[in-house]
Image: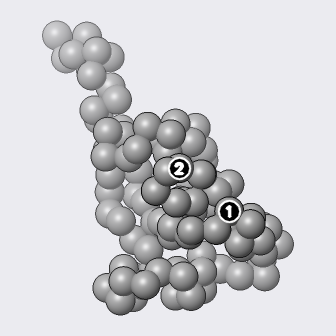
Amino acid sequence: MVEPLFYQNQLDFVRAVAYEVVLDNRDLALEVFYALEENELTFEEVAREYIPNLQLRRAGGYQGVRRRKDFRPEIAATVYAGTQSQVMKPIVTSKGVYFI
């Protein structure tokens, strides 16, 4: 009885621990992404530099454990296709350029 319920609602059970930084500039986002890829910067350094909210900045961009439906659809697709501890390529949305 549990198995059919699980398969029917499995997207509701999947969670991701999320850290995010949102930038306004796509070119800057790509520059920062490549610096992360080359280990010239850490995600924590990016968070400290580019997150204006003091509390989020101190938390390194930590957003908590989030369900798939807690993300914007274009972000959820990328997050759940990625691997653990992977910094995703910048995701461009109408709200800004996201690093997850």
Residue that appears at 39% across and 71% down: 62
Which of the two labelled residues, at mark 1 and mark 2, occupies the earlier sequence position? Answer: 1
Q: Is residue 79 left or right of residue 12?
A: right
Specify few, some or many for label 2: CA neighbours under 10 Å numbering under 14, 14-19, or 20 or more: few
Q: Nearer the viewer, residue 22 or 42?
A: 22
Image height check: is 36 above or below 49? above
| Label ID, residue 93 | 2
What is the x, y in percent for residue 75?
49, 45
Q: What residue is pinned by disc 1?
A: 26
Residue that appears at 74% across and 66% down: 27
| Label ID, residue 9 | none
Q: Quadrant of the N terminus?
A: top left
Tell me the quarter of the picture where residue 73 sits.
top left
Q: Amino acid at mark 2?
A: Thr
Q: Amino acid at mark 1?
A: Arg
Determine the secondary structure under disc 1.
Answer: helix
Res. 85 visible in picture: no
What is the x, y in percent for residue 57?
42, 84
Image height check: is 54 above or below 97? below
Residue furthest out toward the left: 1
Specify few, some or many for label 1: CA neighbours under 10 Å numbering under 14, 14-19, or 20 or more: some
Determine the secondary structure under disc 2.
Answer: strand
Res. 55 visible in picture: yes
- Count of numbered circles in the view: 2
What is the x, y in percent for residue 43?
60, 76
Q: Nearer the viewer, residue 22 or 82?
A: 22
